[in-house]
Structure formats: structure tokens, C-alpha cells
């Protein structure tokens, strides 16, 4: 669905965004650092393990969350790569703005404790990875989930800012080395909690990228 660029609100400063770059098969997280007239300034994105190939004139797609559960995206031209600290991309949106249903989520190995529970049981574990749409949880040694694939459970994720508690669908159970169990959960978070998870995921990915660059 197209949206007139004049009616589509640009993302505000500090808004988490996803950047789709040609030849990269997943969205890269970033953040809006500034707005300069018609330009959007974001933290420069890099692909771990790949040499920098981004150049002026390159077209990327920028997407950010809009309530209640969608994304607003727009094609942008990279007009300048500022070698500041941190490095910045200056983007010029050229539209049209597109409203999308959210289908893909940035994912990262956020470190946090998790408690998965049912009506009469509670099982602790550790996040293997997290996104707005779900999580993989490595259960504590010796623990098993007394639930079956397709069941609804409750997951409480102990993020540093504040815990996120949500109903989740159990979509898979994996048996790993030494018999430890890993469960795969899927959920649909309200916007407030989704924003909290987005920020935690983006922060972890930025930290990982910084380590790659050292």
C-alpha cells in the first residue's frame, strides 16, 4: 500500500530502523541519529565478515515500526558516508512510502534469563536468541518442558530494562548435546513490549558488530 510521502511521518531521532542492503539476505539494524531537512541520518551499517562496499548513490530500503503492528518503508539513496564517530549514513528518501505488515524481525543472541511456565509448572532457561516474533530458549541442564508442540505457554524474558512477559506458542523442541533441551517459541507482542525487544536486539547487534570491527 503506497502512502504519499508528505503524509508519511519520518522516523524520529533514536528510532530503531531496519536497513535492507542489496546482496545481503537479511535486514540490518540501525538507529536514526539526526534529521536534516529531507535527509535521514542513521548509524552506518556494516556486514560482519565482508569488506565495505557501500558507496554514494547506492539505493537501500529503510523500514521502521508504526502502530499497531506494521512497518513503514521507503527507498533511499545513500548521499554521504560520514567518517565520524560513530560513522553515519546520510539518506535521501525518494519514496513512495509503503505500509507493510511486519513479516521479518531482526534477531540477536541477547543474554537474558527466561522462565517458561504453564498452569502448574515453571521451567527456567537462558535465551539462545530473541526477536519481536519469538525466541529460542536453552533450558537449564536436566530440565524438560511438560508441554507439547502447539501448546500455549507463558514466557518471561528478563531484559535489563524490565522483564517482558507474554503468552507464546511452543513451535518446536530440540534435543542438543548432553541431552539439553532447547525450545522454540513464537509470540505477538504489544507495541510497547515490541519496542523494548527491538532496542535490546539492536543494541546486541551493534555490540557484536563493534567486536567484529576491532
Image (cartoon, grey):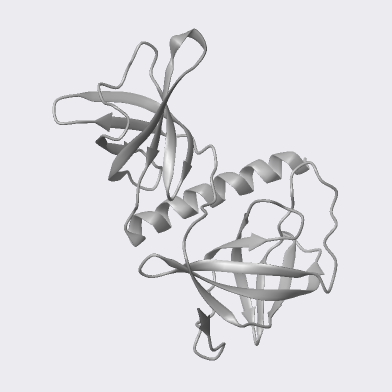
Find residue 138 and report its horizontal and vertical position in percent: 43, 24
- In the image, 161: left or right of 54? left
**Image location (x, y in percent) of residue 133:** 42, 49
Q: Nearer the viewer, residue 52 or 120?
A: 120
Instruction: Answer left or right for 201 relative to 84.
Output: left
Q: Quadrant of residue 66?
A: bottom left
x, y percent for residue 190: 31, 58
> How far from the left and from the top, in percent, is residue 98?
54, 76
Looking at the image, residue 95 lies above or below residue 183: below
User: In the visual, does 41 lie left or right of 101?
Assistant: right
Q: Quadrant of residue 39?
A: bottom right
Residue 50 placement, left or right of 17:
right
Question: Could you tell me which quadrant the C terminus lies in?
Answer: top right
Q: Give the quarter of the image for residue 192.
A: bottom left
Q: Residue furthest left?
A: 120
The outermost residue toward the bottom is 6
Across the whole image, how many numbered discs are drawn on residues?
Answer: 0
Residue at 79 percent across and 68 percent down: it is 82
- Residue drawn 30% across the image and 31% down it: 115
Residue under the point 25% across and 21% down: 146
Could you say which is closer to the camera, residue 57 or residue 170? Answer: 170
Above or below for 99 versus 130: below
Please state which of residues 173 and 85 is positioned toward the viewer in this rendering: 173
Extreme-top residue of the structure: 178
Amino acid at each position: 500500500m503506497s502512502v504519499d510521502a508528505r503524509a508519511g511521518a519520518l522516523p524520529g531521532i533514536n528510532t530503531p530502523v531496519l536497513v535492507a542492503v542489496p546482496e545481503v539476505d537479511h535486514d540490518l539494524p540501525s538507529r536514526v541519529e539526526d534529521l536534516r531537512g529531507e535527509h535521514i541520518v542513521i548509524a552506518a551499517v556494516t556486514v560482519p565478515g565482508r569488506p565495505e562496499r557501500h558507496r554514494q548513490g547506492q539505493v537501500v530500503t529503510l523500514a521502521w515500526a508504526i502502530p499497531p503492528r506494521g512497518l513503514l518503508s521507503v527507498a533511499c539513496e545513500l548521499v554521504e558516508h560520514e567518517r565520524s564517530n560513530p560513522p553515519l549514513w546520510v539518506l535521501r528518501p525518494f519514496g513512495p512510502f509503503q505500509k507493510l505488515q511486519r513479516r521479518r524481525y531482526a534477531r540477536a543472541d541477547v543474554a537474558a534469563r527466561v522462565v517458561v511456565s504453564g498452569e502448574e509448572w515453571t521451567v527456567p532457561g537462558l535465551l539462545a536468541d530473541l526477536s519481536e516474533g519469538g525466541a529460542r530458549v536453552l533450558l537449564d541442564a536436566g530440565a524438560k518442558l511438560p508441554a507439547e508442540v502447539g501448546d500455549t505457554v507463558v514466557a518471561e524474558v528478563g531484559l535489563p530494562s524490565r522483564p517482558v512477559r507474554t503468552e507464546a506458542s511452543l513451535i518446536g523442541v530440540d534435543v542438543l548435546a548432553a541431552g539439553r533441551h532447547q525450545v522454540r517459541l513464537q509470540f505477538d507482542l504489544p507495541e510497547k513490549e515490541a519496542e523494548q525487544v527491538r532496542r535490546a536486539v539492536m543494541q546486541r547487534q551493534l555490540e557484536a558488530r563493534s567486536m567484529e570491527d576491532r
